[in-house]
Image (cartoon, rainbow, N blue to C red):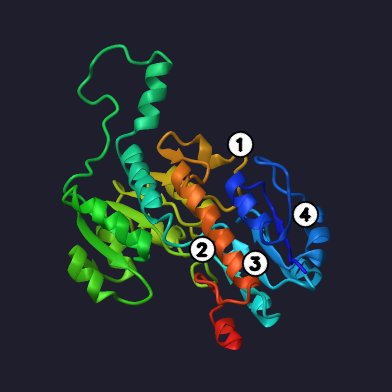
């Protein structure tokens, strides 16, 4: 008897066909509207495999109702939307989609760094509003990127990819992570340092660490005040890593020069949110991996992870790896 799969957003046709050939497939038939919470809770009792997005909170309520649930395939690298320990205690496998979005997210991160430092959005808006009256030496001047210092918080795959891009701009590279990575230090000519030193000496600080209990509110006013007043903060990881109230205060008081944000504590962010009122803050709607090629690969990998789990295999991208040993 075929196992049952539920998908919380309509997938590409070829991915849907791939899954339908193997399972009984149901899905939320909307592209741009999140599945209502009640609908999700009502669907999981009949589901063997759940393919979800980071917009869905897979918590105790969902897991309790998922009496047949064997795998949760998350269409993202991060999985902070899933209560991992509770899923593991129920022997529900959790998978993610690393690797395929590394280069695309690194592109976006560096684009955000450039856009913020050179005031590209602000300058474009100024032109369109008719404010460009003449060439002026100090009109829309920004911060140099070439030859500056970049501090990376979280030197995983994406962090390393950003560092490789920075080498082309002759940037001095610093990083801070849970553990030093000597192999990458040698490859990238990047220096491990403590967080305070990184904040105090970097012209640009890029946050590329996962959101965990340890990194929740990792950057507060205390850390922001240690940055240069000419520095730019870039966050393409997760919104909860930076305390937004503290960031607003730091921007208001001129503690940092600007910020580039692709992620927020609450998504979608309210259009009246104070962060959207700062001209020196470039804001994007969580599009770090949003290229056609990459998002397609993410769907394909999520479907593959789901299939491997439901076919009795250990998924290639199993997050709670302790469950892999139970299957052997």
Please provide percent x and percent y for residue 38.
Answer: 82, 55
Mark 1 or mark 4: whose residue is earlier in sequence: 4
Estimate the spatial distance between the alpha carbons at disc 2 and disc 1, rounded to whole Å. Answer: 22 Å
Estimate the spatial distance between the alpha carbons at disc 1 and disc 4, rounded to whole Å. Answer: 25 Å
Estimate the spatial distance between the alpha carbons at disc 3 and disc 1, rounded to whole Å. Answer: 34 Å
Q: Which residue is mark 3?
A: 72
Let me know if residue 12 appears in the view: no
Is 51 situated left or right of 247 in this image?
right
Is 84 situated left or right of 205 in this image?
right
Q: Residue at x 28, y 60 (%)?
A: 200
- Residue 37: mark in rendering: 4
Q: Label 4's element? A: helix
Local packing at callout 2 (Cα closer than 10 Å; few below 14, some 14-19, many 20+) is some
Estimate the spatial distance between the alpha carbons at disc 3 and disc 4, rounded to whole Å. Answer: 16 Å
- Residue 217: mark in rendering: 2
Q: Residue at x 77, y 50 (%)?
A: 36
Mark 3 or mark 4: whose residue is earlier in sequence: 4
- Residue 272: mark in rendering: 1
């Amino acid at each position: 008897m075929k196992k049952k799969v539920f998908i919380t957003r309509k997938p590409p046709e070829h991915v849907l066909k791939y899954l339908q050939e193997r399972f009984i497939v149901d899905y939320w038939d909307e592209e741009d509207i999140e599945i209502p919470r009640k609908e999700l809770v009502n669907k999981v009792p009949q589901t063997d495999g759940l393919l979800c997005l980071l917009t869905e909170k897979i918590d105790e309520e969902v897991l309790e109702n998922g009496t047949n649930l064997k795998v949760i395939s998350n269409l993202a690298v991060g999985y902070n939307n899933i209560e991992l320990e509770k899923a593991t205690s129920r022997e529900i496998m959790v998978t993610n989609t690393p690797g395929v979005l590394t280069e695309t997210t690194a592109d976006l991160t560096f684009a955000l760094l450039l856009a913020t430092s050179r005031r590209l959005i602000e300058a474009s808006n100024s032109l369109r509003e008719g404010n460009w009256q003449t060439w002026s030496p100090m009109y829309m001047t920004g911060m140099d990127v070439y030859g500056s210092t970049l501090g990376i918080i979280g030197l995983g795959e994406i962090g390393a990819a950003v560092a490789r891009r920075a080498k082309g701009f002759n940037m001095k590279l610093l990083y801070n992570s849970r553990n030093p990575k000597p192999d990458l230090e040698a490859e990238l000519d990047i220096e491990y340092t403590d967080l305070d030193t990184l904040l105090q000496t970097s012209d640009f600080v890029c946050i590329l660490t996962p959101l965990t209990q340890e990194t929740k509110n990792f950057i507060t006013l205390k850390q922001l005040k240690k940055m240069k007043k000419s520095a730019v903060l870039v966050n393409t990881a997760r919104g909860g890593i930076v305390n937004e109230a503290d960031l607003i205060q730091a921007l208001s008081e001129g503690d940092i020069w600007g910020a580039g944000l692709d992620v927020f504590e609450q998504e979608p962010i309210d259009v009246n949110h104070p962060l959207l009122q700062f001209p020196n803050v470039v804001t994007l709607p969580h599009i770090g991996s949003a290229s056609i090629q990459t998002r397609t690969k993410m769907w394909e990998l999520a479907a593959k992870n789901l299939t491997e789990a439901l076919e009795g295999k250990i998924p290639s991208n199993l997050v709670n790896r302790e469950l892999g040993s139970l299957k052997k």
